[in-house]
Amino acid sequence: MFDNLTDKLDKAMHVLKGHGSITEVNVADTLKEIRRALVDADVNYKIAKEFTSRAKEKALGQGVLTTLKPGQLLTKIVKDELTELMGGDVTGLNLTGNPTVILMSGLQGSGKTTFSGKLANFLKTKKSKRPLLVACDIYRPAAIDQLHVVGESVGVEVFSNRDEKDPVKISEAAIAHAKQNGFNVVIIDTAGRLAVDEEMMTEIANVHAAVKPQETLFVVDSMTGQDAVNTAKAFNERLNFDGVILTKLDGDTRGGAALSIKSVVDKPIKFIGTGEKMEAIDVFYPSRMADRILG
Ligand code: GDP
């Protein structure tokens, strides 16, 4: 994960490791390299620049020029800044609803259906919940089939109605079904499109207004870099979502989405997807991710 970024950050800080005495120029050069590494990883230039300005201020303020171990000090400062950039503390799900309604949003192919299954499995096995999955893609029968396959694989019931063409009605019927049958979490998998379009946004906004979810989650493919951030912005403007799910972090992703999304939409990354299997889900811990990035 983020191997390229890890390598570049390591190289950037190498100069400071092993140096007995360093100069402000050494620090400035190192930070410039760090900024370049972040931009190469697809972090927006402004975010990368602010990042290194803060790191520089801290480094000089904390005596990087006089410490015996400048490399160690700068590594700690960069780690803290990376953690902050990715959201600081870990943010859990609000599961207080009765039932709790979780609305999944995102583009087609982002990994929504897969993640809905992973989340249902996680809530069932790790949080002792009784989830119900809901198929709300009214355009693609294959998407409904896919959710049924996913639900079956994790032993979670799937609610669908192939004759109903209004996702609001399907969602409302699913919530009524959950109440009658003792399901305490309802996970609604909605239709995505290949790109942001008005019809999709209106449709999901209507479902959102009708079911008033405790959690609206935006699912995004981390491989899509800056596009991921732009899509997040568009969905957030419409839905004011509660959290981000970053999928496909097992792939050859550069890391920009993970590092930029929080500062662009000011919403936490709550989970990550790290594979196609139902178990490939992790709670997102910004400080652990920062550790991994620093290698
Ligand atoms: P949806 O259209 O948003 O519902 O997306 P899908 O759930 O159908 O996922 C699209 C493709 O991405 C499928 O082939 C999934 O198996 C794959 N996928 C989903 N999440 C992950 C992940 O975390 N890692 C990898 N490698 N593949 C994933």
Image: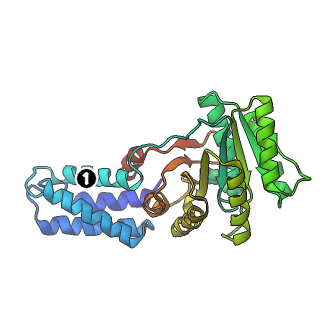
- What percent of the width, then of the height, locates residue 141? 86, 56
Q: Could you tell me if residue 175 is visible in this image?
A: yes
Which residue is at a point 38% across and 56% down the rendered structure image? Answer: 85
Picture layout, residue 196 above or below residue 14 = below
Identify the residue at horizontal 77%, vertical 35% (top origin). 178
Q: Is residue 83 left or right of residue 67?
A: right
> Residue 157: in sight, yes or no?
no
x then y, percent, for residue 258? 47, 57
Q: Between 169 and 138, which is closer to the camera in this rendering?
A: 169
Front position in the image: 177 or 255:
177
Mark 1 falls on what kind of element? helix
Ligand 1 within 8 Å, label 1 CB: no
Which is nearer the eye, 75 or 161?
Answer: 161
Display coloring: rainbow
Q: Position of residue 161 (x, y in %)?
A: 87, 48
Which residue position is annotated with label 1?
77
Displayed quadrant of residue 45: bottom left
Q: Where is residue 151 in the image (x, y as percent from the top left)?
A: 76, 40
Residue visible at 54% across and 69% down in the picture:
230
Q: In which quadrant of the rendered view does residue 132 lie?
A: top right
Q: What residue type is labelled 1?
A: Ile
Q: Number of callouts in the render?
A: 1
User: Mark 1: few, some, or many residues within 10 Å (few <14, many ≥20)?
Assistant: some
Q: Quadrant of ligand 1?
A: bottom right
Q: 181 or 74, which is in the foreground?
A: 181
Relative horizontal placement of residue 139, taking residue 219 as reference (left or right)? right
Residue with the most extreme right position: 163
